[in-house]
Image (cartoon, helix red, strand yellow):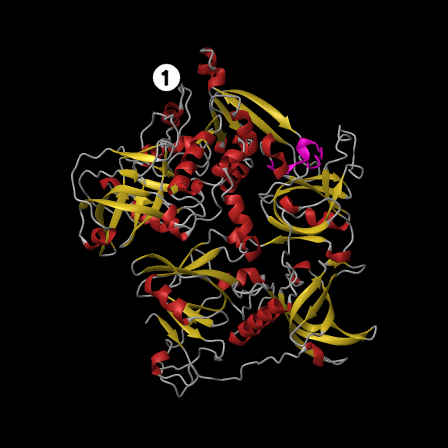
Amino acid sequence: MPVHVVKDGAGPSTQVPAQPQRISIPLLCPTSDCTGKTVKGRVVHKGPLVSMGEDNYVLKTVIQEEDSQQDMSPDHSSINVILFGALAKDYSESVSQGDVLLVAGFTVGKSPTAHKDKLHACNLQLAGDDAWVYVWPSTVSLRAFVPSKRTSPVSTEVTKAAKVVKYTYAPLSDLTPGVVVNVYAVVTFFKQPFRTKGTDYCSTLKITDQSNKKVGCTIFCDKLEEHPKIFKMGDIIRLHRVKTQLFNGAISLLTSHGFSVVTFDGTVGSPVVPRTSSGSFKFGEEDCQAVEALRTWAANQSLVPAVPCVPLSAVQPKTYFDLTCQLLAKAPVDSSCTLLKVWDGSKCPHPLLDVFVEPNTLEGSPTLSKDIANLTANVLVYDNHVEVSRQLKPGSYLRIYNLHAVPGASRLPSNDSGQSDQTEHLGFYLHGGSSYGKGLRVLPDDSPDILDLKRILETFSDSDINDSSLFEVWSTPPESIGMFTFFTLMLLCTISGFPVNIAYTHNGLEGRGLEETFGTTYVSAVILGASPDEIATERKCDHTVEQVSLAEVKSRGPPQVFHVQAQLKSYQPQRLYQSLKLYCHECKTIRDVPDDVTVGGVFSEAQKDVGPCNNGYWTLELNLPREPPSESPSRNLTLLISSQLMGKGKAKELIFLKGATLEETCRIASAYSNIVPVTSPQGTMTPLDLSAPFLFRGTKRYYGCKQCSQLKVGESLGEGVEVLDEKSVADALGVQLLQYGLLMKLELQDGTGSLEALLWRDAESFFHVSAEDAANDQEAQDRVQETMDRLCPPGSSMAERPWMDLCLSAYTVEENGQRLTCYQICHTDTRGTNPHTHPHTHATPSDT
């Protein structure tokens, strides 16, 4: 068993290796030699077990080193651990939050979520027979891993050495003045932290417990992040080492030396996940039971409002309410007011106030079509809340407390821009001060409070959003890649009968080439019972086979072709922009489309090169002012044009751009045919690192293969070429052009079972779009979304989904000495999503 649980009085079956050499978590890096070394930490988060197929599991957990001697922040002492296979399953069954782990046989990779979860920049990956985990449950103490002189080096045992610290919690009704206590309670009222006249922050709470005693609590902390993370009334709070005092004849609580606080979501049935910024805290099964008991009691006492937040669709004038929303954009109005543009996916029944700000002051992308302008609400934030609003990032999820709905524009700052006719329009104001709990707070992405909001926003009809906002959604992939994508790419190695090398750029893992050969694959689908107005597909295969069940498909050995009738149970990825991939026909490498953060970083790094270009190109330099004046130096924007093209009167057909940001490059590309961003190390002009696009054509971006490209820029550029397009520019620059592709995994189901099949080689004909268009064009994006929505309507039951007549190809892949069976859908032509089809003018990933 790869996971070993150590118990008090453990026998030889739970021995650890003699004198294991530990490496501190803050010291880990991708180049660390971890052979024979271990890492120890306490489990602070345990994710769900994810099944990727038969006996193939993945689980993510977070451990925190509690005794690090390094001068590092607590964030660097916490690290993501990814477990695979049987190890992941054993871990899920054996380990609980709060347990202590000793792990070995791991590899170190770059964490794709480090900038988002603020944990260690690396992660630990455990897989195979060499990986093992020793577990000390939270109820068992452990001592240093140094064998005594009486202990054999081969049979070192872990035994109980010290008494486990046990906390006692006092009922609120039993509190007396002048003592330090620990309490568990339900939050019935709270104010967001505010700055005092001194150097610290203060927050106030009202709490209660099963004794029905209501107690006030005042918390003082130097740092804002050390205050309790309370998101709504009804949250559960655990306070350690608070002092009782008598104030106005009533008992109240005040922070004392060694104070610590942990909070939990108060919703019955939600995961018991501690919320704290503490570097170390104790949490075991008894704590879990205390939280669950308070949740159940509070629900029965009606302490929590039935509707903690009001959606925009239910807002009435002259009322105060709490709003959960997503921030689209923000802008300063004046020194005491900030504008927040937010939405929650619902439409306010009243006309909303339009606030004018200078476009260059707006941070974010709030653009929505005029037909649904009321989906965006303008919130004016005043006074002490302005400081908090400056830290907000567009795209984050917010909860705004005690928001005031006010009709008219009489209080609108700078009310001089044609807004006087909005006297009947509704405006939203977060007034200054902290009375009645006024404030705003960022909700974490995994908060249960925003699950419904996310679901609404993610499934919102694409047709209601204009081209620019949809382009932003599609062209900005997630900051981290999910584990599903990794395993999907591993399966993808088998498609089309050629070897594929996987470049998994998000976490540094690089897959091996996997080879297998199989005959011509035909796959088709027909939606049974579809009317002319509904979706249907046309079969293009010319073979004849009997129809079988999915269970029979799985019982037969590949390679074979099957006809089945099935429904679409689910598909991945749900966010369809994640299905976009970049593929190299030369080396068979697949990579994800880089996000704007990655691309912007390449442009920022290139701006450090301020040297001249000596390629003999015609040059125009523009000096750009500092933005803002006090923070960044002035810089030059250089445009370089081939003298040869100028002589042919084609100067505007190809422009090299040096020193520009990503945003500036996109703006310039919208007006010219071909923009190539360049840098000039040692004075020689060369394209940027191929992590960024080497060419911008309007809204389209083109990428090159790092492995196969041999970059060059010569004066003979464009010689003998009549029309400059992405292929001719790539050839001239020595770039191996990457091809866009669409990759999806469909889970099929019939009465006998379920089966997963990939849609890759013929995904473009399936959707009647090219992958390149899907990366940039709204109409193509609509067609993909519409197809999937008709095959798997959001919120529908299996009984409401259409049956499909499918043709599946089964084939095998050899990996790590094991043969895996995979399935693929191809040669499928859908009908009914859009009467207009676009011919493909470029090669697809299957054209090899």
Asked whether residue 580 is in view, the answer is no
| 711 or 142, nearer to the observer | 142
In the image shown, does 274 or 661 lie closer to the viewer?
274
Q: Mark 1 points at which residue?
A: 721
Residue at horizontal 42 percent and vertical 36 percent from the top = 786
Q: What stretch is highlighted in magenta?
A: 351-366
Residue ID at (64%, 63%): 304
Query: Split into 4 quadrants, where in the image is the N terminus?
Result: bottom left
Q: Is mark 1 on a helix, strand or loop?
A: loop
Q: Is residue 599 magenta?
A: no
Q: What residue type is labelled 1?
A: Val
Residue 511 position in % (x across, y down): 32, 49
Residue furthest right as drawn? 248
Residue ID at (22%, 38%): 522
User: Residue 246: percent from the left, percent from the top?
Assistant: 80, 76
x, y percent for residue 144: 47, 78
The answer to whether residue 362 is magenta is: yes
The picture quadrant where one finds residue 253 is bottom right
